[in-house]
Every structure is written in C-alpha cells, then in structure tokens.
Image (spheres, rainbow, N blue to C red):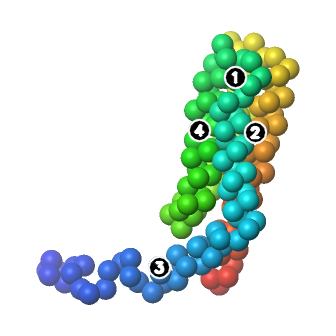
Amino acid sequence: MSTENMGTGSTKLAEHPDIVAMGARYERAAETPTAQASDALTVLAGLFVALSPWIVGFTESAVAISNLVIGLAIAGLGAGYAFAYERTHRLTWVCPLLGVWVIIAHWVMAGVATTTGMLLSNIIGGAAVIVFGLAAMLPMMSARRSAR
C-alpha cells in the first residue's frame, strides 16, 4: 500500500462521526449536576488525604508521604474529570483503587507506628475517595448504555 493512501484523505480520525458522537455523549454525561458534584467532592477528598498528615499530626511517617502523593494524584484526577471528562473518562477506575490504598497503606508499609488519628483519617478519607470515585464512573457507564 502506498503512503499516499494512508491517512492523507480528507477524513481524519478525530472527525470520524462515531468519535464525535461519543465525545458529545461523554460531554453531556459530565455536565450533569451529579457528575459535577462528584468531581468536586473527589478533588476535596484528594486534598483531604494529601493534607491529613498535617491536619491529624502524623507527619513523621512514611504514610504521610504516601498520603501527600496519592492525595494530590486523586485531586488531579478529580480535576481532570471535571475539566476534560471526554479525555479522562477511561481513568475513573483509578480513584477507587487509590482509595483502597489509602485505607490499607498503614498496614502494608513496614515500620509504621499507627495512631488512632492516622487510622481514622485514612479510613474516612479512603472511603470517601472510593465512594466519589465510583460516582465518577457513573456518567461513563450511562454514556455507554445510551450508545447501545
């Protein structure tokens, strides 16, 4: 096949009708009040997880570094869901997994002296991330169902 026939036509992949329609479905799904609320709550939950070592007072622990990095990642994902859902919708499964990590991190990491505050903040923060992460998955699932 010659290179003149490969991708040089007037129809580009981004202009394909199916891709344009799929992008429009994802955009409509992300614009619902429920989706916007779950995205905002995901950002807030991520910020809580990131700041919890300083709020609760376990900054001298390896869990503090984990919470900071994971919390900022969660907040970044939530912002991505809010501002570019059509491009980040395939990453919605990551937030619930990160929430599970936040819950189990202090048990998995070696040499961590667990305090009650650390335990409670990680369980509450991780559970919130799981719930809001699952809620962020709903627009994607409803958009896929409407495509059928």
Q: Amino acid at mark 2?
A: Gly
Residue located beneath label 1 in the image: 54
The answer to whether the residue labelled 1 contacts the one labelled 3, judged by CB atoms less than 8 Å apart, is no
Label 3 secondary element: helix
Q: Nearer the viewer, mark 1 or mark 4?
A: 1
Point out the tag, 2 or 3, that comes first from the N-terminus.
3
Q: CA distance from mark 1 to mark 4?
A: 14 Å
Q: CA distance from mark 4 to mark 3?
A: 31 Å
| Residue at 57% over, 64% down | 85
How busy is the neighbourhood of tag 1: few (under 14 within 10 Å), some, or many (20 plus)? few
Numbered badge on residue 19:
3
Residue 38 image-quadrant placement: bottom right
| Residue at 67% over, 41% down | 46
Point out the tag, 1 or 4, that comes first from the N-terminus.
1
- Residue 103: x percent and y percent? 76, 34
The answer to whether the residue labelled 2 contacts the one labelled 3, judged by CB atoms less than 8 Å apart, is no
Q: CA distance from mark 2 to mark 3?
A: 35 Å
Point out the tag, 2 or 1, that comes first from the N-terminus.
1
| The N terminus lies in quadrant | bottom left
- Residue 74: x percent and y percent? 62, 44
Numbered badge on residue 126:
2
